[in-house]
Amino acid sequence: ATAQIGVTGLAVMGRNLARNLARNGFTVAVHNRTPARTRSLVAEHGDEGTFVPGETMADFVASLERPRAVIVMVKAGAPTDAVIDELVPLLEEGDIIVDCGNAHFADTRRREEALRAQGLHFSGTGVSGGEEGALLGPSIMPGGSAESYAKLGPMFEKIAAHVDGVPCCTHVGPDGAGHFVKMVHNGIEYADMQLIAEAYDLLRAGLDATPAEIAEIFRDWNNGELESFLIEITADVLAHTDAATGRSFVDIVQDRAEQKGTGRWTVQSALDLGIPITGIAEATFARSLSGHVDQREAARRAFPDAGEKWQVADRDAFVEDVRRALLASKIVAYAQGFDHIRAGSKEYAWDIDLGGTATIWRGGCIIRARFLNRIREAYDEQPDLPTLLVAPYFAEAVGAGVPSWRRVVADAARAGVPTPAFSSSLAYFDALRAERLPAALIQGLRDNFGAHTYQRVDRAGSFHTTWAGDRTESPA
Ligand code: NBP
């Protein structure tokens, strides 16, 4: 047994992760259900490091040093369970199975519990960054026991992306914590992309600008607070011309956004935990809406001229308004995402370090951004921060952006340009800072039709009014 770690499942992700490990000096056992993939990996990349190919699962496991660490990188769902079932009889107490696929955290919790009962460690590990990240340095979010991290940590921290010399990998927490954090990461990615898309749409409508001109604006924004991978590639995509037609690429692509489901998982979990992640939810619904082609067609025909003509007087001021509104909305989306992680951590007793989570997203992953440093600072300064919105840096950015945010959302509403994420983020902000919410009326209605009781502002206890009778109030 010579291999320090093994990878089973050698499609694009597993293959690149195995190569990354090998390139970093680790001896990597490799295996795939269809052995041709194993052979081609060794044939094409065998010179990049030391691979120990296993034709069968038994050969593969036998080539691993103890405690064995096996990365499973197969299609999420039933294939993961099938591979685990095949591995378990071949493993011994203290060995570690690492699921680097996109599993739902509830599945990870179930698998971890079952394997723990058999004396095995199970690390549900989120890996972000796609194919390229897997090869060159992903953001890695490992969950599972501290013992499993003692073995995996040094390897994962070495192959992860690094920012300022710090690896984009940390032990997130027990059982499903890693996959949970990966899920919220993807949810934030949905919100980030929706906000960017709305900003583009606003600039296009307000300035009557071409995609190539808007690309320049994003390029400029990428030199400031908004600097991030997504803003950078937005400029790239907007500047791209379709070779076949000579038109802007963004104009020849069908306007129906697809999804693989992690946005939906994030929203479902947030609903269960009672955490308003309106930015992620609007982004997920906006993708769904874009796909309802028949409804869109019918509504377009019914309401052809529902908006007013948009005339921007000062172009530079408008661009700056959109930039500030984008930053403020983005801060809301992150604040909500971190609230969600905090709630998940509490519910499942994971003890997740929120600042540490921001740190491992600074590189390797899709939402990598300069501004994540600020999230780390905010939680370092005040670990029990009620919301990121009130941390000094974010409070200043949001506060400075409020007039712009209101102008942009109001102008868009008048012009009939949909801004679900911009406007719901502003509504969230206004609701959070409101002195009184109309929730009081909702409590009154609930008590009226269902005797659900309410609490008073001036006395402790729960009360009910006899709405159908003499309207006297009594303690409930
Ligand atoms: P796929 O998700 O396409 O899965 C293909 C792999 O699963 C092949 O190795 C295949 O073996 C194996 N497999 C299947 Br399918 N059923 C199996 C079974 N019953 N038993 C054993 N092996 C089985 O590969 P991928 O695109 O490399 O993604 C791998 C994981 O990484 C997925 O969970 C995916 O969601 C996740 N992912 C993450 C990112 C990211 O950015 N983090 C990107 C893409 C994917 P075969 O060769 O014998 O058919």
Image (cartoon, rainbow, N blue to C red):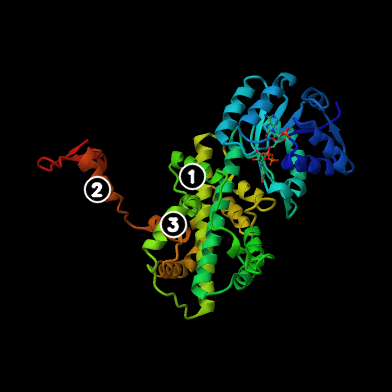
**Is label 2 within 8 A of ligand 1 (CB to nearest ligand atom)?**
no
Image quadrant occupied by the N terminus: top right
Quick one: label 1, few (<14), some, or many (20+) residues within 10 Å?
many
Cβ–Cβ below 8 Å for labels 3 and 2? no
Task: Provide the secondary structure element on which disc 1 rests.
Answer: helix
Q: Disc 3 to disc 2, how far (Cα)?
A: 49 Å
Q: Which mark is residue 458?
A: 2
Q: Is residue 157 above or below residue 367?
A: above
List the residue tagged with mark 1: 267
Q: Earlier in the sequence, mark 3 or mark 2?
A: 3
Q: Where is residue 77 drawn, in percent x and y? A: 61, 33
Q: CA distance from mark 1 to mark 3?
A: 24 Å
SS for tag 3? Answer: helix
Quarter in which the C terminus is drawn? top left
Residue at the image position 23 percent from the left and 41 percent from the top: 447
Residue at the spot x=20%, y=39% of the render?
464
Q: Nearer the viewer, residue 70 or 199?
A: 199
> Where is residue 202 drawn, in percent x and y?
50, 68
Residue 60 at what x, y percent from top left?
A: 80, 27
Within-10-Å neighbours for mark 3: few <14, some 14–19, many 20+: few
Q: Which residue is mark 3?
A: 296
Q: CA distance from mark 1 to mark 2?
A: 36 Å
**418 and 88: which one is in front?**
418
Residue pushed farthest bottom?
Answer: 313
Name the residue type under label 2: Asp
Ligand 1 - quadrant of the structure image:
top right
> Which secondary structure lies at badge 2?
loop
Q: Is residue 476 left or right of residue 153?
A: left
The reply, left or right, for residue 286 in relation to residue 47 is: left
